[in-house]
Amino acid sequence: MKEKVFSDEFLSQMRAWLIARKDSKLAILKRGGEQALSHSPRDIVRIDFALRRMAEGQYGLCVQCGVTIERERLEFMPETPFCAKCARERRN
């Protein structure tokens, strides 16, 4: 049996946070205006991808290298699919 990387409590908190972020971003995009300019429909895609990875038991694993994404990074950016190292490499 595969060992869990993160506790059920942490995953539940991240799931709730992702859903709240998605709802907020959808409302902002729907309203339009200046605030919507700093949001993107791609944000929704990233959140949906994170929720799907969570449902599949892959949440918190870097999609590029497979290592566990740092907990602090997930808490700051819960929809990130990359560990800090891979994110830096992708920017270069």
Image (cartoon, grey):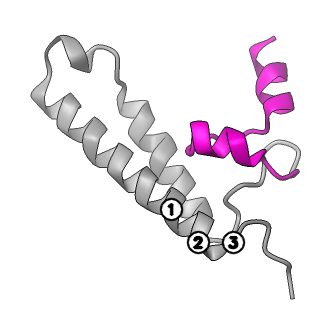
Q: Give the answer, above or below, for where 63 lies relative to 31.
A: below
Q: Determine the residue positioned at 22% across, 30% down.
A: 29
Distance Cα–Cα, label 1 vs label 2: 6 Å
Q: Determine the residue positioned at 62% across, 75% down.
A: 8
Question: Is 13 on the left or on the right of 92, as rendered?
Answer: left
Sooner in the amino-acid sequence: mark 3 or mark 1: 3
Q: Say which element carries label 2.
A: helix
Q: Is residue 73 visible?
A: yes
Q: Say which element carries label 1.
A: helix
Q: Is residue 81 visible?
A: no
Distance Cα–Cα, label 2 vs label 3: 5 Å
Q: Amino acid at mark 2?
A: Glu
Q: Which contiguous range is marked in magenta? A: 67-92
* Residue corresponding to mark 2: 9
Residue closer to the observer: 24 or 55: 24
The C terminus lies in quadrant: top right
Residue furthest to the bottom: 1
Question: Is 65 on the left or on the right of 46, as rendered?
Answer: right
Q: Which mark is residue 13?
A: 1
Q: Determine the residue positioned at 43% across, 52% down.
A: 17
Q: Position of residue 33 (x, y in %)?
A: 13, 15
